Image (cartoon, rainbow, N blue to C red):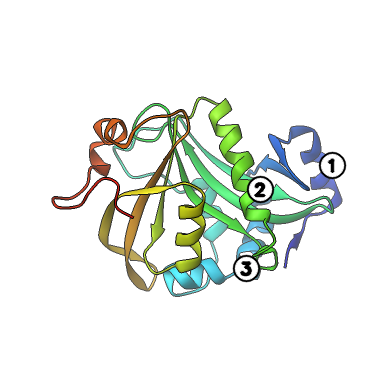
Amino acid sequence: MTTRIDGALGARRAPAALFAAGAFCVVELDDADIPELQRFFAANPDYFLAVNGQPAADDEAYEELHGALPSGWPHTKKWILGFVDASGALAGMANVVSDLLATGIWHIGLFMVATGLHGSGAARSLHQQLERWVRGQGAQWLRLGVVEGNARAERFWERSGYVEVRRRHGMAMGRRVNTVRVMVKPLTGGSLPEYVAMVERDRPEPGQAESSG
């Protein structure tokens, strides 16, 4: 299921597309898009149920755009991207942070495609083009966290070339307390020892190998 974007918004967005991915164009969302993003979250609850144990909050879209990163987490910009199909429908979104914790590390905070597109290859195509775009912006690594037990997401990121560097336990998320697998992918040939030397926070716990997962 996708969420319809009105014609005026589609027309306004077309010249401002950041990049294309197959049948989709990828645009930066702003405050004017909050109602459409909120409707998308409501229409596609699987992620929120799997991770938070409850549907998206009523202010979920607003928080995606305006929620601050934790204190002491350096970064250059938080991007909220919309994946728009040829009919002008919002088919997915991504929250991406540039230069998080260290220059050249880009973080995917959230990556969603509409439930109706699962299994179609759309997510893989969108991720591949997102990866190409961030590399063109200077990214050397992609980083993300995936909830242990969210099997579909775990398989997707593993197949996309991400490797676990550590686990963070006891993470309160909505109604659940989760273990989060921190995963990274080199975009320019770096090694995991080089990565963890840059990011102390992601260094493996004692007894946990850097290449686990």
Q: Secondary structure at mark 3?
A: loop
Spatial CA span between label 3 and label 1? 25 Å
Q: Is residue 210 left or right of residue 44?
A: left
Q: Amino acid at mark 2?
A: Ser
Q: Secondary structure at mark 1?
A: helix
Quadrant occupied by the N terminus: bottom right
Q: Residues within 10 Å of mark 2 (few under 14, many from 20)?
A: some
Nearer to us of marks 2 and 3 is 2
Q: Earlier in the sequence, mark 2 or mark 1?
A: 1
* Residue 56, visible in the rendered structure: no
Residue under numbered circle 1:
11
Q: Earlier in the sequence, mark 3 or mark 1?
A: 1
Q: Residues within 10 Å of mark 1 (few under 14, many from 20)?
A: few
Q: Residue at x 42, y 28 (%)?
A: 104
Spatial CA span between label 2 and label 3? 19 Å
* Residue 167, visible in the rendered structure: yes
- Percent from the top left, x then y, of residue 141? 43, 34
Residue under numbered circle 2:
125
Residue under numbered circle 3:
44
